[in-house]
Image (cartoon, rainbow, N blue to C red):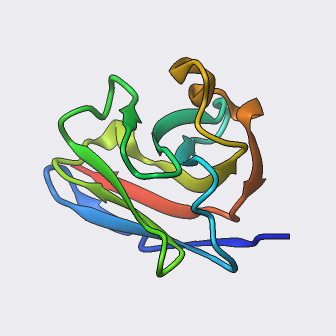
Amino acid sequence: QVQLVESGGGLVQAGGSLRLSCAASEGTGSYVMAWFRQAPGNERTFVAYITANGDSTEYADSVKGRFTISSDNAKHTVTLQMNNLKPEDTAAYYCARGYACPPERDLGYRVSWYDRWGQGTQVTVGS
């Protein structure tokens, strides 16, 4: 069973940048990989995903133009580059593995599409 470990979270001021990494214990090239986030008292919500071949990406409207997801299948890693961070980006960020390239792209926005999750890394954005 694949294990996912996130790293790179921390405290940053508004307008700053962070880079999150997700390391997988085995290859994930046949799956869709995603980032979700969850603030206390809120639902876990979609941030971004990248398809198995790395040829398609999707982003939540709230992060478009600011966040970039990428993958390196050879290194078994997925990265989330976050620029121009805002206080509302504050949350625990989770890496997830899904079944395959979603036949309908909006399926990949759903928590239920993913069967493996990391433990999360905290991102806190001050003002």
Residue 55: x %, y % from top left: 36, 45
Residue 3: x %, y % from top left: 75, 72
Residue farthest right in this picture: 1
Q: Quadrant of residue 30?
A: bottom right
Viewer-closest of 3 and 17: 3
Q: Is residue 86 left or right of residue 28?
A: left
Name the residue: 46% across, 38% down: 47
Viewer-closest of 44 and 90: 44
Q: Is residue 103 left or right of residue 70?
A: right
Q: Is residue 101 left or right of residue 63?
A: right
Name the residue: 16% across, 47% down: 84
| Numbered disc total | 0
Q: Is residue 118 left or right of residue 101?
A: right
Residue 114: x %, y % from top left: 73, 42
> Where's the N terminus, which quadrant?
bottom right
Query: Is 34 above or below relative to 6?
Result: above
Q: Quadrant of residue 66?
A: top left
Name the residue: 69% across, 63% down: 118
Query: Is 117 above or below relative to 41?
Result: below
Name the residue: 70% across, 65% down: 119
Residue 31: x %, y % from top left: 63, 51
Viewer-closest of 105 and 4: 105
